[in-house]
Amino acid sequence: MGHLSWSGAIRNRSTGAELPLEFVNHPPVIPAACATLPDQTTCTTPGDVVLFTPEFAAATPAGAGVEVVLDRRGCVLRTATTRGTTLTPSQTSLQATGQETVALLKVKGCVHTDLKVSNENGDKVPLHSGLYGVTGRYRLTANGEIVVPGGTGSFFDRNPRTIAGTTWDGKVVLATIDGRQTTSVGTTMNETAAVAKALGLRNSINLDGGGSTAMALQDGTVVNHPSGTGGAERAVGDAIVFVPGR
């Protein structure tokens, strides 16, 4: 648990030339000043270079910009002066917008893709199958001490909360705090951190809260009281799921 950073780049195997990546499996941002240009390579406003893998979709996002399709070895198969194509399971795609379109169209031969996640000390975090990540805001405790920052506004006021953390002996703890109800008003960020410390969490973080705070058992039984109308669960698309080990 800590502050992680991501970086990515493609490097030409022959020339060593590098091109930084902005995203993976995320549509590139089209500069507003260049959205209607008939020739995107004339754009002088910075844009994005992004990588799409076969897991993203059978079709890559269409729109202004350029695209280069690579085979399983990272070698260029085809280029296009518009974005949006179909990928086979062995292909990946690079898209560019803004002034980066010129640099991407210059990519020839084969490239190596370097994706790296680093911790707050700058050390590389090994990536492997079965490794997952989840973001939160903010960190509540670090080495047993409350570290949540001060702040004002509705986010820092009393709300339903979701806490994830680890104890001193390495156990993982998930906790929910009901809110916006007569039986429980929720907690401020400082109060949430105090709860985490009281639970004995050495390191902990505040996850998505409000109407998104919900906890369910294996059979689907919701064990907290979501703040939606009539106790309805919010239709969110992500969750932390614990399954029996095999």
Image (cartoon, rainbow, N blue to C red):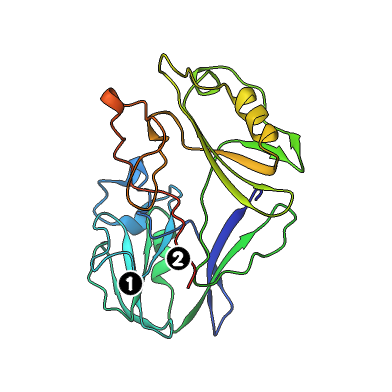
Q: Which mark is residue 54?
A: 1
Q: Residues within 10 Å of mark 2 (few under 14, many from 20)?
A: few
At 62% from the left and 69% from the top, the residue drawn is 126
Distance from the alpha carbon under mark 2 to that under mark 1 = 23 Å
**Looking at numbered disc 1 in the image, what kind of residue is underneath it?**
Pro
Give the answer, above or below, for where 22 lies relative to 230: below
Residue at figure coordinates x 47%, y 37% from the top left = 208
Farthest top residue?
182
x and y, in percent, of residue 86 in the image: 22, 71
Q: How many marks?
A: 2
Foreground: disc 2 or disc 1: 1
- Left or right: where 13 falls relative to 179: right
Q: Estimate the x, y position of residue 182 in percent, counting from the top left.
A: 41, 13
The picture quadrant where one finds residue 142 is: top right
Q: Secondary structure at mark 1?
A: loop
Per the rendering, the mark at residue 103 is 2
Viewer-proximal residue among 243 and 100: 243
The residue under the point 37% across, 53% down is: 218
Please provide percent x and percent y for residue 151: 62, 21
> At x 48% / y 79%, what residue is drawn?
111
Q: Is residue 56 above or below residue 16?
A: above
First reached walking from the N terminus: tag 2 or tag 1: 1
Please give left or right for residue 168 compared with residue 192 in the image. right
Viewer-nearest residue: 92 or 48: 92
Residue type at mark 2: give it: Ala
Q: Circle 1: is it few (<14), some (14-19), or many (20+) Cα within 10 Å? A: some
Which numbered tag is attached to residue 198? Answer: none
Identify which residue, 35 or 178, lies in the foreground: 178
